[in-house]
Amino acid sequence: MRAQAASEFLVIIAVLSFIMAPFLLIVYSNASSSAEKIAISKATFSAARLASSANAVGSMGLGSRLHATVELPDVESISTSKNEVVINVRTGYGIVSIVQPSRFQLTSDGLEKIKTAGIYTLDVAGPAAFGSAEKVSITLR
């Protein structure tokens, strides 16, 4: 009698495990894709903030300067390319490039040192003198 009850209990546990396994796999895959969506959103917001700060500083004129604080996920690289801020984010699907345009030419210094997730403060400085082709520099503090 006890053996029959124990074997029935094991069969019920096995059936419930088979029912729950697909559900748990779906929940796990959704959780991992949510983390990647958050990382891409952080990178998009950070790139937009840097481009917006560059536009503001460039519009303010000579000698203007701002401090931009951004929260970045794990990144492959951050760079400026002519009039664009480019952030490459590592995801499970590969590297995703986030690009935000600016109205001014951009230069950067020290951004290649950023590799880990965190909150960073960057200096955004406008042209120092006439003839510098309205270049805005973004520098890691």
Image: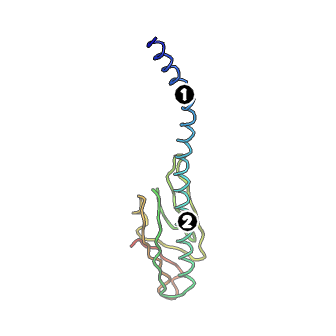
Camera-side mark, 2 or 1 = 1
Q: Where residue 30 appears, x then y in whole percent?
A: 56, 45
For marks 2 and 1, the one nearer the N-term is: 1
Residue identifier under label 1:
16
Q: Are dots 2 and 1 in contact, CB under 8 Å?
A: no
Q: Where residue 44 appears, x then y in whole percent?
A: 56, 63
**Amino acid bearing label 2:** Phe
Q: Is residue 12 above or below residue 22?
A: above
Q: Where residue 113 appears, x then y in whole percent?
A: 39, 63
**Amino acid bearing label 1:** Leu
* Mark number displayed over residue 124: none
- SS label for mark 1: helix
- SS label for mark 2: helix
Left or right, residue 139 beside residue 88: left
Q: Is residue 6 above or below residue 117?
A: above
- Which of the colour schemes (rainbow, by chain, secondary structure, one colour) is used? rainbow
Badge 2: how crowded within 10 Å, few (<14), some, or many (20+)?
some
Taking the view exactly as shown, the residue that stands out farthest to the front is: 1
Distance of mark 2 from mark 1, alpha carbons?
Answer: 43 Å
Foreground: 89 or 31? 31
Residue identifier under label 2:
45
Q: Where residue 59 appears, x then y in whole percent?
A: 57, 84
Question: In percent of the image, x 42 and y 68: which residue is there?
Answer: 120
- Which quarter of the image is occupied by the C terminus? bottom left
Q: Is residue 135 above or below residue 12?
A: below
| Residue 109 found in image quarter | bottom left
Give the total number of marks visible in the rendering: 2
Foreground: 36 or 22? 22
Q: Is residue 16 above or below residue 84?
A: above
Badge 1: how crowded within 10 Å, few (<14), some, or many (20+)?
few
Question: In percent of the image, x 48 and y 63: which residue is there?
Answer: 78
Question: In percent of the image, x 47 and y 65: which residue is there?
Answer: 71
